[in-house]
Image (tube, rainbow, N blue to C red):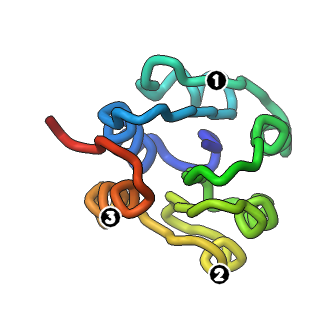
Amino acid sequence: MDADNVTARRLQPVLSLLGTVTDDVQLTASGRPHTLAAVSWPTGSVLLPHEGWQRADVALADAYRPDDEALILISGDGDFALLVDRHPGAVLVVSGAPSGRLRDTATIVDPATEGVEPIRRWLAASGIAGGTDH
């Protein structure tokens, strides 16, 4: 999650939904310290505070490990397009303004306008258990 690239209004509903997932989920986020502090993160989230141009992006790219598992990228930054394109598993991009390169290679959801139901359906289609409001 690129916390500097997605507003808390878009980020928090997704994090709340992911907090209900019963499968093992690894959450990694990077951004400015004050941006990370403005969000309620699920237990076990790995937060990588960074400041400066592209440092958060580099930290996220460095933390990424390709596998067949589903990947949720919460960022609209086109710098991640190659990573998304080469990821062997299903990819969901959460963003209000994703780059064209991301739109070409992944499912896109904007929870600020669509709510979290499309994300819940994507989780189910990707075989991820949980994702309920209960």
Local packing at callout 2 (Cα closer than 10 Å; few below 14, some 14-19, many 20+) is few
Residue for badge 2: 104
In which quadrant of the rendered image does the C terminus lie? top left
Q: Earlier in the sequence, mark 3 or mark 1?
A: 1
Q: Is residue 113 above or below residue 1?
A: below
Query: Which comes sooner in the sequence, label 3 or label 2?
Result: 2
Query: Closer to the camera, 130 or 52?
Result: 130
**Toward which corner of the image does residue 52 lie, by quadrant?**
top right
Q: Residues within 10 Å of mark 3 (few under 14, many from 20)?
A: some
Q: Give residue 68's quadrant in the image.
A: bottom right
| Type of amino acid at the residue the image marks with label 1 | Leu
Q: Residue at x 70, y 49 (%)?
A: 67
- What element does badge 1 sit on? strand
Between the residue at mark 3 and the residue at mark 1, the CA separation in whole angstroms equals: 26 Å
> Which x, y percent locates residue 15?
41, 37
Give the x, y percent position of residue 89.
62, 60
- Residue 7 lies left or right of residue 60; in this view the side is left
For image coordinates 55% across by 53% down, the residue present is 70
Query: Looking at the picture, does residue 63 appear above or below residue 14?
Result: above
Q: Is residue 125 above or below residue 39?
A: below
Which residue lies at the image location 55% right of the left edge and 68% below the top edge? 97
Q: CA distance from mark 3 to mark 2?
A: 18 Å
Residue 1 percent location from the top left of the image: 61, 42
The residue beneath circle 1 is 47
Q: Residue furthest top?
A: 43
The residue that label 3 is drawn on is 118
Identify which amino acid the numbered label 3 is placed on: Pro
